[in-house]
Image (tube, coloured by chain):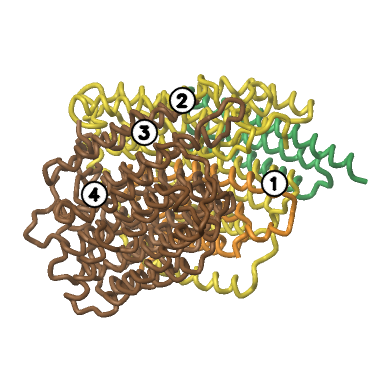
Amino acid sequence: MSPLDLLVAAPLAFMVAALVAGQGGRWLILAAGPVMLALSAWLVVLPPGVAHLVGDWDLPLGILLRADGVARLLVPATSACFVAVALYAWHEFSPKAGAETARAHTFWPMLYLMWGGSNAGYLTTDLFNLYVTIEMVSLAAVAMAAMGSLAAGLQYFLIALVGSLAYLLGVALLASHYDTVDATLLAVRARPDLPTLMAITVMTAGLLVKTALFPLHGWLPPAHAAAPAPASALLSAVVIKLGFVILLRLWFEAFAEIIRPAAMDLLGGMGALAILYGSVQAIRQERLKLLVAYSTVAQLGYLFLAFPLIANAQNPAEPWAAVLVHAVSHMLAKAAMFLAAGLMLKAVAGDRISDLAGLARAMPLSVTAFALAAISLAGLPPSGGFTAKFLLLHAAIEQGRVVPAAVLVIGGLLGAVYLFRPLSVAFSGSAAPAVRAEAPLRVAAPLALASLAIALGFAGMTLIELSSVAAPPAVAGPVQAEPGR
Amino acid sequence: MTATFELILCVMILGTACVALFVRDFLTAIAFFVVFGNLLGLAWLAMGAVNVALAEIAIGAGVTGVLLVLTRSRLLALGEEIACGPARPWLRLGAAAACSAFTTLLAAAVLSIAPGDDLAPVVDGLMPRIGLDNPVTGVLMAFRAYDTLLESFVLLGALVAVWSLAPPAAWPQPPVALRMADPAALNVAGSFGRLLLPVALVMAAYLVWVGSDRPGGAFQGGTVLAGGFLLAAMGGAIGLPRSDDPRLRWALVAGPLVFLAIGLAGAATGRFLAYPDGTAKALIVTIEYVLAFSIGVTLALLVAGPPARAGTGP
Amino acid sequence: MTVPAVLGHLFPLTGAVLVGLGLCGFITLRHPLRQLLAVNVIGAGIFLILGGLGRGEGVTDPYPQALVITGIVVSVALTALGTAMIARLSEDRRAAGSGPDQPKDQDP
Amino acid sequence: MTWTDLAVTLLLSAGLFFYAAGTVGLLRFPDAASRLHALTKADNVGLGFVALAAALQWGSLVVAAKIAAVWLFAILAAGTSAQLMARVARQDDGDGP
């Protein structure tokens, strides 16, 4: 037994159990939470270089699973998000006798499907297997987005479908050209010829659409803002990270030797524009959930701004760690923020920022959770967001790159502006609105996630060490042995 | 001779695709799409890929075609136009230009890849270890069983996702009934469905059984089964189940569950999804039978759609 | 390029053209159901590229065949979800009446 | 060319003739009922000849039985769908002028 298998098999088993249990499906999280957190912890403490082939069938046919730094950071964060979201959704998606709704029943199996799919995606190095995991995650994501607005869900569905097909087209070209779709083998075999470049281009384009990098972000704000709070949290925190992880695998592992610096700069430039555009749009929003959704557009920019910084660094391990820490802290903070926003908006029965007046007194814990998440998102110390942005800024200055450094600073300022606005409204006002008390679990979930995002700021060295486990040669340098079999 | 046949086939594939995409009337489009799918099946036959041909005709043309026809009639019943006006000229022109450029690049990329079955010897070398003769089943159920396992959950998840779309107060009613409204037509379709359901059962079992050694397998068999269920439902021979029926739930999860359980049993004795020596064939056939049954039920319900309020019909 | 070489690439080339045609259809067709049909054409083209390039002497490589079967099943699952969403959206719009807020939901 | 080959060629030609006739009927006949008549009857005979040719070519009883089963199911499906389509066509006529 290995956590590499169980991290995928267990959520799928819980999905089956949720389907069979019917009404009682939501109780399963009481078992699934501890099991998944324990498995994630097991994954983190595995010795470095742990990897194995599913069914012991050798490459190039088989599928390789691997516990590298990316997985060791993202799997536990994903588990934390899912557990918190599930506890939060406990009441919202509970089948009530007499007034049963489809979503109360279907939310739980889909949550486990998404969980299993994300874990499978982080752990595999097989590009076709990644296609199947993308579809597992998208399927659940589309259905969750459609719970809020069917029209936004349908738009998301069609765009995600074309994105996955673009990715599949690239996989088809690679599979025919190199007789393998394994990233570790492609790293050895790939040559810079037309089919390979074509495959990289269409795969990257498809994944960028699914990751919603500016200017391909159009579908994200309506879908993420309209969905119910737990669904928004999962969509913004977890779903878009999978596309990003696959891009890391492609750009820094499978094709690290082939990709030109100009392409890295292009991606970095798009990231910079995403930061500026998303922040400005977030500042202009009147509705709280749209603000948070546009903040996702901006924060995604940082992930890609880091690409040229990693590629050109003297010591690439540092920006590599930064981008992973940013992914993790954004995951935790954004999930916390959507959950807290959901509580706040439900309390005031509105969706505008101006509706929040005086809320800090009425529901201090939820506003605190929002504020803690905001600290991490804006990159203020001490927080995971700060660690990530500090490392990125350090790398940019070290390389003498003025534009990324400036964008990092300006993005941080703009982030502080748009995140401060709802908080200042919540703290303003003389009278506290009358608010119905929420269940303790629902209040605790966002607070726990936001605190985790802050706590990451104190674990910088551990995170950096974890991120370098079995890192691809392009990041770890040539001394590191090839990723183990 | 063969080359001429393939050339004509490709021209027909492209022609039917063009009509299916760009003809104004959507029913014509669907008809041509189904023909397109069948021609693709012929193309796969011409390539000697009988397994794919079966899957393409049954799933790609058959199930997808039925889905499109049903959705069209549901939209028409709601009074929605599907044949929308043509796009603005500049958009059409721009799209045509961009897509031609993209196609040219893609074609150039495809041309520079040498076709070849370089992995076939590798697969053939491994086949004796699992005791099957159909190499495609070997790849699907052993060498890349992980893909297939996840894929079975994709199918199950798609049904759950479709269910999540049920309108308020419809849960857990059955989907909109598929049975024909006209009594005389129901009579005709009913006797056809009653006759064909057992035949479909036998056919599905046969397809799964021969799938170990010759073309066939769980997905092809499951699709035949789904076709039998759908015909029987259209003829009123069987009703559609409520979505909270425990027997239905077990029928849906049985295939993925057995697959997962056998995979985990492999993990307990060695490696996830590894079959102990000598047991591979028995285990694979077991998985395939249960999986085909679950796939049949899942596909049929996917076509039927989300739960609907009682009394609403097309 | 000799003629037989092109003939060896006949099916993958057809697949490439299908991908282009489907993409063009996806961009120019405005109804989601027709876009879904276009997506299926793109998928068929990709499968034809994948399978056609695995064609050897007489038989086709089982490895791409298996990938294609997996792809076909995944794509029918997604198509089913898409058609269900389209039908439900139409029902909701009908129930809400074709009010002034209807165009808002459509993509610009 | 053996006698079998000759028989196969003749059977195939007969099949093609009936297919062509059915298609001409589909295109030329004036109303739905007669078009369906052309499609189902002529095409099924055509399919029968082609099936016979295939069975003969293969020269195996098992395969011939399978081909016969395919032919039977094709006839059954064609008959059923023709019935259903004819009903719809008649209803449409009744609604019309």
Asked if labels 4 and 3 touch by Cβ distance under 8 angstroms, the answer is: no
Q: Is residue C4 left or right of residue B126?
A: right
Tag 3: amino acid:
Leu
Tag 2: amino acid:
Gly
User: B191 or C40, which is in the foreground?
Assistant: C40
Disc 3 designates what residue? A12
Q: Which of the two discs, 4 and 2, labels the residue nearer the N terminus?
A: 2
Chain yellow in the figure, letter:
B
Helix, strand or loop at label 2? It is helix
Disc 1 designates what residue? B75
Name the chain under label 2: A
Chain orange in the figure, letter:
C
Chain brown in the figure, letter:
A
Q: Which of the two discs, 3 and 4, labels the residue nearer the N terminus?
A: 3
Q: In this structure image, what is the colour of chain D?
A: green
Q: CA distance from mark 1 to mark 3?
A: 35 Å
Helix, strand or loop at label 1? It is helix
Disc 4 designates what residue? A73
Residue A369, compared with residue A411, is above or below; it is above
How crowded is the residue under tag 3: few (<14 C-alpha within 10 Å), some, or many (20+)?
Answer: many
Q: Position of residue A151 (x, y in %)?
A: 59, 53
Helix, strand or loop at label 4? It is helix
Name the chain under label 1: B
How crowded is the residue under tag 4: few (<14 C-alpha within 10 Å), some, or many (20+)?
Answer: many
User: A76 or A183, which is in the foreground?
Assistant: A76
